[in-house]
Amino acid sequence: MNLIVDIGNTRTKFSVFNQNKEIFTDSVSEFLPSHVDNLLNSYPPISKAILSSVRDYSFELKEYLRKKFNPFIELDDTTPLPIEICYISKDTLGKDRVAAAVGAFYLFPYANTLVIDAGTAITYDIVNKKGQYEGGNISPGIDLRFRALHQFTGRLPLVEKRNFQKLFGKTTVEAILAGVQHGVIYEVEGAIDRFKNSYKNLNVIITGGDAYFFDKKLKNSFFVRSNLIAIGLNRILEYNGGI
């Protein structure tokens, strides 16, 4: 069994895979050695682990994982991957984006796939049918847009996302809801259309904390895979002899 640890911008997700099947997943604000011990008590066959992080984490956690698992892989820009990274600044490419791209190629091998990760930021990443990660786009996430309007203006209130179907608002709160949420939908639709013009038979996967926000809101068809990054990390571990 494999332990997958994904340290994101705000929370840490961790999963247990039995070969290619995810059998447990959870998330915490901070992943500690005690969580590792609890997992090993519940799933003694776990023997291998991979850690991916987009922010700093404790040296103690890394050393504890290294002591408990063999192999233990700390994902970085030198880790061997089952896809080719065609990105100029590989050292600045987010590990979450790499893992999502690997997960996409695992789910749709030798096919053109666009990965949209809707979280703190919204990222668009393209994996072509040759198994090459070509690059992508980064824009502010939904909550970040709400906060920016509040923080960088004098009087606009902080609004939280919720269901809003009207074309436009008749109050300031409604206007912000319409502007942010409809704007994100227009952006995602436009991005999908442009990628489809360049890549034939394009698959679209949406993942991330806001993935389900787009349910029934997009004209284009897409697949939701909330655990895409975990799938990709497990595949990387597998590729490096983790099973």
Image (spheres, helix red, strand yellow):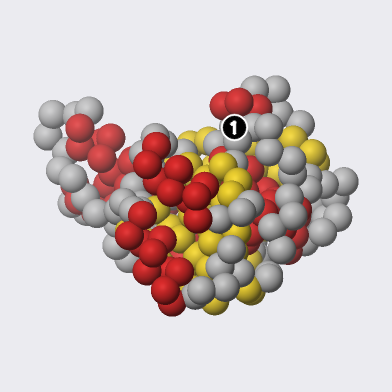
Left or right: 155, with 67 as reference point = left
19 versus 174 height, above or below: below
In the image, is 85 to the left or to the right of 159?
right
Please name the residue shown 39% across and 37% down the image.
59
Q: Is residue 79 visible?
A: yes
| x, y percent for residue 191 | 62, 44
241 relative position to 158: left or right: right
Instruction: Give residue 37's quadrant in the image.
Output: bottom left
Instruction: Residue under label 1, please give it.
Output: 93
Q: Residue at x 22, y 28 (%)?
A: 152
Q: Is residue 14 above or below residue 188?
A: below
x, y (%) of residue 14?
46, 60
Q: Quadrant of residue 137?
A: top right
Location of residue 45 by image quarter: bottom right
- Residue at 85 percent across and 50 percent down: it is 129
Quadrant containing the N terminus in the rendered view: bottom right
Furthest residue in direction left, as rendered: 155
Q: Quadrant of the C terminus?
A: bottom right
* Residue 68 on image: x %, y %: 50, 55
Does residue 123 lie above or below 24 as drawn?
Answer: above
Residue 115 placement (x, y as % from top left): 63, 51
Q: Regarding mark 1 in the picture, which secondary structure is present there?
A: loop
Q: Give the total of numbered labels.
A: 1
Q: Please give left or right for residue 211 compared with residue 82 in the image.
A: left
Q: Residues within 10 Å of mark 1 (few under 14, many from 20)?
A: some
Task: Point out the residue furthest to the front here.
Answer: 67
**Of residues 137 and 168, the one drawn nearer to the viewer in this rendering:** 137
Residue 83 vs residue 206, the one in the foreground = 83
Picture residue at 34% right of the left edge, 47% below the top: 10
- The residue nearer to you, when weighing 170 against 238, is 238
Q: Amino acid at mark 1?
A: Leu
